[in-house]
Image: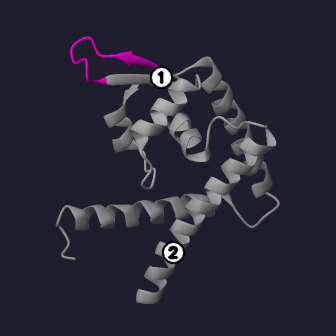
Amino acid sequence: MKEQYLGIILAVERLHRRFLDVVKSRLDAAGIEDINNIQTLILYNIGNETLSIGELTTRGYYLGSNVSYNIKKMSECGYLENERSAHDRRSVKVQVSEKGREIIEMFDGMFSEHVKHFDESSITGNAMMQLRDQLNTLEDFWSDIIAHRIKH
């Protein structure tokens, strides 16, 4: 069981890196050079919401990326609009600009294309739901360890 567990951990890491490669490949194909793959995922996760950097960090899993730096770069390149809180001048809320929405739409299209190709592979909707459920269960297990509900 230990070998399978370690194999899953490595597979999740590889999958994340491979997905970042897919995002980078799509950006390259579109000739977009002023936003990187991590920034694209952050942008996509903001979507139609207005979020603080803290909220965004809590929601997303950007594997060691510096969210504040990436927000600053995306704002400088016109992908995000910033708004300082009237009550707390240190707090900044961000929302996607029109330029950012174009990126989100491009990736929505890419995801739709991927789903169409699932029919040509062995990936079924039921298998995807089971995988998602199992990964969520693993995440809950790790959360319990962090919260010291399970000894580690």
Query: Which three-letter amino acid code belongs to the residue tagged 1?
Result: Gln
Please tell me how crowded label 1 is: few (under 14), some (14-19), or many (20+) other residues with Cα within 10 Å: many
SS type, badge 1:
strand
Camera-nearest residue between 3 and 122? 3
Which image quadrant: the C terminus?
Answer: bottom left
Q: According to the image, label 2 marks what residue?
A: 10
Q: Is residue 17 left or right of residue 50?
A: right
Could you tell me which residue is drawn at 22 percent across and 18 percent down? 88
**Badge 2 or badge 1: first in the primary sequence:** 2
Give coordinates of residue 8: x percent, y percent: 50, 75
123 to 61, vertically: above or below: below
Instruction: Report the disc number at residue 95.
Output: 1
Binning the other alpha carbons within 10 Å of mark 2 as few (below 14), some (14 to 19) or many (20 upward) gives: few
Give, as a single range, the part of the protein colored magenta.
Answer: 81-91
Expressed as whole percent of the image width and height from the top left, the position of residue 137 reads 39, 64
**Residue at the farthest top position:** 86
